[in-house]
Image: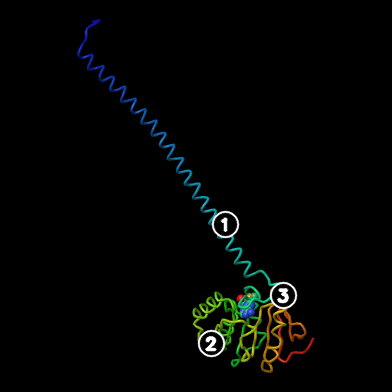
């Protein structure tokens, strides 16, 4: 009936209103969920992006580190214009001798049990360690760089060769190596040349083996090429060139 107010219909309409509000609330919450979800997804994407960038940067850093260490081991030394000496500083950088070249250098020296082997500028100590390990002789490495001295000493400890190998921190131009009967070097031509007066004083028959570089004015007994690198051998007293 028009104009009448049926209490039942009022109850019904109040239910309908509630339903409408409820569905609106639902819609609203769905929308805000959607918005929040979108925000969340965006934040996640940003985070992922940051993570990928971090990983890329870390990868790049690792690659650069690897390349620099490879350069350290493989880049050949080249003779350079002599620079003024800085006391306490290396005259040449650290570049390692390949294991096969180390083995051949020691073979060429014909090491005997009573020999004393010195490596002038011993780096990580690989030559003196190989001499002590393969020939059971006493060996001394002289190295100026304190970090390399520590590394070489650590390698000696690892190999348990403390009774045979000594790593001395010092300058090859100042240290005494007059008890050497075998000397190995991987330096530079001008440094070899500068060492000649001291090398010439070594006991008769001492062998000097140099990786890559000659000694101007001294005629080598043997010159060999291993892995594309020259190995020079002299015996004291050497012949003039
Ligand atoms: C090319 S590396 C050779 C390393 C090692 N003998 C080898 O063959 O693997 C030359 C080494 O000599 C060291 N050195 C350079 N000048 C030196 C000096 N005046 N006295 C002692 N060591 C020196 C450097 O620190 C470096 O470790």
Q: Which mark is residue 164?
A: 2
Residue for point 56% across, 75% down: 148
Q: CA distance from mark 3 to mark 1?
A: 35 Å
Q: Quadrant of residue 171?
A: bottom right
> Which label's residue is closer to the chain start, 1 or 2?
1
Residue 13, placed above or below residue 183: above
Q: Residue furthest right?
A: 241
Whether residue 62 is visible: yes
Q: Residue furthest top?
A: 2
Q: Residues within 10 Å of mark 3 (few under 14, many from 20)?
A: few
Q: Residues within 10 Å of mark 2 (few under 14, many from 20)?
A: some
Residue for point 54% across, 54% down: 57
Q: Which residue is mark 3?
A: 82
> Which label's residue is closer to the chain start, 3 or 1?
1
Q: Nearer the viewer, mark 2 or mark 3?
A: 3
Question: How far across and how far down the image is residue 216, in percent?
Answer: 76, 82
Tell me the element at label 3. loop
Question: How far across and how far down the image is residue 121, in percent?
Answer: 62, 79
**230 vs 14, nearest the viewer:** 14
> Does the residue tagged 3 have its C-beta within 8 Å of any atom of ligand 1?
no
Tell me the element at label 2. loop
Q: Quadrant of residue 200?
A: bottom right
Q: Which residue is mark 1?
A: 60
Q: Residue furthest bottom?
A: 204
Tell me the element at label 1. helix
């Amino acid at each position: 009936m028009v104009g009448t107010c049926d209490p039942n219909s009022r109850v019904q309409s109040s239910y309908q209103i509630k339903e409408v509000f409820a569905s609106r609330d639902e819609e609203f919450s769905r929308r805000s969920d959607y918005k929040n979800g979108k925000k969340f997804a965006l934040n996640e994407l940003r985070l992922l992006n940051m993570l990928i960038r971090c990983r890329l940067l870390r990868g790049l850093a690792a690659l650069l580190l690897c390349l620099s260490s490879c350069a350290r081991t493989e880049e050949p030394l080249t003779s350079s214009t002599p620079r003024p000496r800085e006391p306490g500083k290396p005259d040449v950088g650290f570049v390692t001798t390949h294991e096969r070249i180390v083995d051949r250098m020691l073979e060429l020296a014909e090491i005997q049990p009573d020999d004393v082997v010195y490596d002038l500028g011993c780096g990580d100590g690989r030559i003196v360690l190989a001499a002590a390990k393969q020939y059971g002789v006493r060996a001394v490495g002289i190295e100026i760089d304190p970090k390399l001295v520590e590394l070489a000493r650590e390698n000696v400890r690892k190999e348990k060769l403390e009774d045979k190998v000594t790593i001395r921190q010092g300058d090859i131009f100042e240290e005494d190596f007059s008890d050497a009967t075998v000397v190995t070097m991987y330096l530079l031509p001008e440094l070899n040349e500068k060492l000649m007066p001291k090398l010439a004083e070594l006991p008769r028959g001492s062998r000097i083996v140099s990786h890559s570089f000659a000694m101007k004015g001294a005629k080598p007994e043997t010159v060999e090429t291993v892995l594309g690198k020259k190995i020079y051998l002299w015996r004291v007293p050497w012949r003039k060139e």
